[in-house]
Amino acid sequence: MPGSPPNPRSSSRRTTPSARVGPRDAGAVAVNPSRWDVVIVGAGIVGAAIAEALAGTDRSVLVLDRSRGFTGATGRGMGHLVALDGSPPQLELCRLSLDLWRRKKWREAVQWNPAGTLWVAESNEDLDVARAKKAALAAGGVDSDLVTAAELRRLEPLLAEDLAGGLLVPSDAIVYPPAAACQLLEDAAQKGAKIDLGATVTQVGGGRVRLARGEDFFSRHVVIAAGWESSHLVQDLARGLRVLPKKGELGITWRSPLHVRHQLVELGYMRSTHASSGDSVAFNAQPRPDGQTLIGSTRSLSDSTRRVDPKRFARMMERAVRFLPFLSRQSLVRCWSGFRPATADHLPLIGPHPRDPTLLFATGHEGLGITQSLGTARLIADHIGGRSLAMDWTPFLPGRIPEGSDHE
């Protein structure tokens, strides 16, 4: 993969787990070190959230990850906390998660920014999309405001002057994902979870987790939160549902006195998100705390390389300049690529394996993993704890597609 995305945080603030959550030196050790109540495979934002939700109970919790930093989607995404209306279940999970995000007390540590989302209409046809989006959000309990062309220019003076208007969702927010995941892991460790980084899992199933270094762990519940690599851990996941790596690219500018105020997204974004083949680009821009602008985004299911594709990236930047002309005069400090964990029906996999109840999935969130991490963790914790679920997770259950069906 290209060089890691730039860290906009000052050097005095950590964005990778500290020694307190390093291999074998954090959290409570089970009475039998090979037996745990819950083993979580994956220490990205979703796995970290599940660990934090389960730690501090009467259950022993172990988190395993082959990386010692956030090298997957958590370390390479935008950190946009968004109520997305792709479908009613998707929106409900977003809303549950956003409510949980707002209750967190460590906002400064994760660079919390209640900027809201400004969905931008390029044309009158896009304004029709904005009205439909407003209605869908309202049905899901999310407030939003239609914005005229004049109001759009007042809210974001740097936007192109010929845009038609937009839709403002003031309750959306922004976080810095590596810092958020780091905070969740540290909170989990302080409450008794053990975090083992640098531990490569090679096989799971039947309540057993095997590591490349030869160890076996046994657990009542094994949670797979390994992003797009989840398919490699459970081979028969490919028979019916697969987690697909959907490539994306981002770029970030140098610091500048010119910067946007909201998370900006074009209203054609959902067409890009739901593209089932080929490459697509859509305008997406995020203000960073130090005056940088984070620019996206691209999507590709056909490109499995780890390098930034220059043609696709150029298309993305052309789209960005169309909405934010000032970017044509800005220099990029870096660009990078990453892979979103996607499913063919655009819904995450959350819940037990249909034939192995010891296996629980928490993956396939595509571009909503940061937003939906806390809600996903709540559902997994409710299930393991034997409580009523915070919402109906039927649409997300791994067994929703008949086994053996062609679901690519």
Image (tube, grey):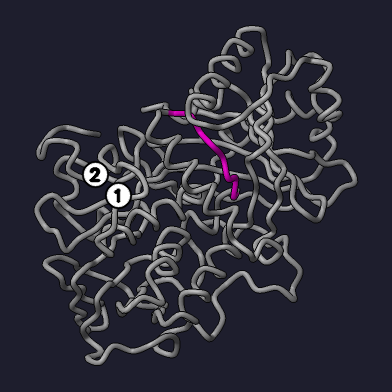
What residue is at 69 percent from the left and 45 percent from the top? 294
> SS for tag 2?
loop
Nearer to us in this view, 312 or 372? 372
Q: Is residue 313 above or below residue 137?
A: below
The circle on residue 245 is none
Q: Is residue 392 above or below residue 181?
A: above
* Image coords of residue 360 (percent x, y): 24, 58
Q: Residue furthest front?
A: 388
Q: Amino acid at mark 2?
A: Leu
In whole angstroms, how far apart are the C-alphas of marks 1 and 2? 5 Å
Magenta part of the chain = 79-86
- Whether residue 391 is in magenta: the answer is no
Whether the residues at callouts 1 and 2 have beta carbons within 8 Å, the answer is yes
Q: Quadrant of the C terminus?
A: top left
Looking at the image, residue 350 sits to the left or right of residue 2; the answer is: left
Residue 397, numbered circle: 2
Q: Nearer the viewer, residue 401 or 114?
A: 114
Residue 361 in the image: state x and y as whole percent: 27, 55
Pinpoint residue 183: horizontal percent, then vertical percent: 56, 70
Q: Left or right of 38: which side holds 158?
A: right
Instruction: List the residue tagged with mark 1.
Output: 350
Lower position in the chain sequence, tag 1 or tag 2: 1
Please, what secondary structure does the residue beneath circle 1 have? strand
Q: Amino acid at mark 1?
A: Ile
User: In which quadrant of the rendered view does residue 149 lie?
Assistant: top right
